């Protein structure tokens, strides 16, 4: 159990400090970062499967339904990765963190809508409070926090799709990168032919970071897979808040992003919703009920 908790905590910590990594790639367009992340992740995952001698063991599970599920998952993952990288490099780390704060509650709502799951009466309270927070930010800032909402709903829907998927984390990521690899590689080649490519043209440091995006994308997923298999679900549910908390602190303290009183008020509503949600879940666990809906436990970024 301790190994599982440590693995999950490290995974969430790594996801939490992602903004530092992607800030170092600020000179590269977000679309090219996405392309490199997909291509190098594809290579890293395939090497991992070869080393662990699992390369052929999962392909027997492939059929039309599986390919459809993972095609949808791949598109959602690409959207999530692109918006996240763009938001970090455009100076919206704080708003990105809001997306991952509200993601568990969005996932709960999606479970109710699409899986017909039933919430305990008190679980509707944090959903309403979080919705009020988003509405407040929309009214006071003049527009919806679209970055946060896109991240929350893309990854919430990704988790929903993966709930129906038969493959484990490594095999699932392998198939998703299989689906995205050719378009990503074609785009990067196109950029090279147009003279706008960044790889090897922006210095060895940046090129090295681009190549390493595959490793930094896959390793937290593998650690998370270890953690979620052996650590208590309630513990994993609490640990997931490490990621947006670190992102929020980095945005405000390290990157100096604006955090006005209006934004603070909206965030307080969201934080209050999460505190309520967590306490209610812990009390439910003491009564022998499911503490966290499975959909709330997902893989960020």
Image (cartoon, grey):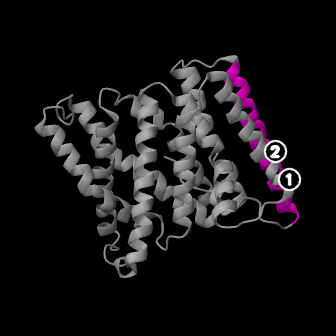
The residue drawn where x is 45% and y is 53% is 76
Which callout, 1 or 2, points to the residue nearer the camera?
1
In the drawing, what numbered circle is on residue 276?
2
How far apart marks 1 and 2 lie (CA) works out to 9 Å
Q: Are marks 1 and 2 in contact (CB under 8 Å)?
A: yes
The residue drawn where x is 28% and y is 39% is 32
Q: Which quadrant holds residue 67? A: bottom left
Q: How far from the left and from the top, in percent, is residue 182?
A: 23, 56
The residue drawn where x is 57% and y is 40% is 149
- Category of crowding for the residue at label 2, using alpha-carbon neighbours closer than 10 angstroms: few (below 14), some (14–19), many (at least 20): some
Q: How far from the left and from the top, in percent, is residue 292?
A: 73, 58
Q: Which quadrant holds residue 143? A: top right
Horizontal side of residue 296 vs 171, given as left or right: right
Q: Nearer the viewer, residue 272 or 68?
A: 68
- Relative to 194, residue 188 above or below: below
Q: Nearer the viewer, residue 122 or 12?
A: 122
Q: How far from the left and from the top, in percent, is residue 298?
A: 58, 55
Q: Is residue 232 visible?
A: no
Q: Quadrant of the N terminus?
A: bottom right
List the residue tagged with mark 1.
Answer: 122
Instruction: Assign a secondary structure to mark 1.
Output: helix
- Relative to 58, residue 119 above or below: above
Magenta-tinted stretch:
262-287
Instruction: Assign a secondary structure to mark 2.
Output: helix
């Amino acid at each position: 159990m301790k190994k599982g908790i440590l693995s999950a905590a490290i995974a969430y910590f790594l996801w939490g400090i992602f903004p530092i990594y992607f800030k170092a790639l600020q000179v590269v367009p977000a679309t090219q970062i996405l392309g490199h992340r997909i291509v190098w992740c594809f290579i890293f995952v395939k090497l991992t499967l070869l080393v662990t001698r699992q390369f052929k063991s999962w392909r027997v599970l492939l059929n039309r339904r599986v390919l459809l599920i993972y095609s949808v998952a791949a598109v959602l993952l690409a959207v999530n990765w692109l918006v996240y990288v763009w938001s970090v490099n455009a100076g919206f780390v704080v708003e990105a963190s809001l997306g991952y704060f509200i993601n568990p509650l969005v996932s709960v709502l999606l479970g109710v809508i699409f899986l017909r799951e039933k919430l305990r009466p008190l679980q509707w309270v944090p959903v309403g409070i979080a919705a009020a927070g988003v509405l407040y930010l929309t009214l006071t800032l003049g527009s919806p926090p679209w970055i946060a909402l896109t991240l929350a709903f893309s990854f919430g829907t990704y988790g929903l799709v993966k709930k129906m998927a038969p493959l484990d984390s490594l095999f699932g990521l392998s198939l998703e990168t299989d689906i995205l690899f050719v378009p990503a590689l074609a785009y990067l080649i196109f950029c090279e032919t147009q003279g706008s490519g960044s790889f090897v043209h922006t210095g060895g440091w940046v090129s090295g970071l681009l190549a390493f995006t595959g490793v930094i994308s896959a390793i937290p997923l593998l650690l998370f897979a270890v953690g979620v298999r052996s650590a208590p679900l309630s513990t994993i549910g609490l640990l997931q808040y490490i990621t947006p908390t670190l992102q929020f602190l980095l945005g405000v303290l390290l990157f100096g992003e604006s955090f006005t009183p209006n934004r603070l008020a909206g965030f307080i509503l969201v934080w209050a919703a999460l505190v309520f949600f967590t306490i209610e879940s812990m009390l439910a666990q003491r009564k022998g009920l499911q503490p966290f809906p499975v959909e709330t436990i997902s893989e960020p970024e």
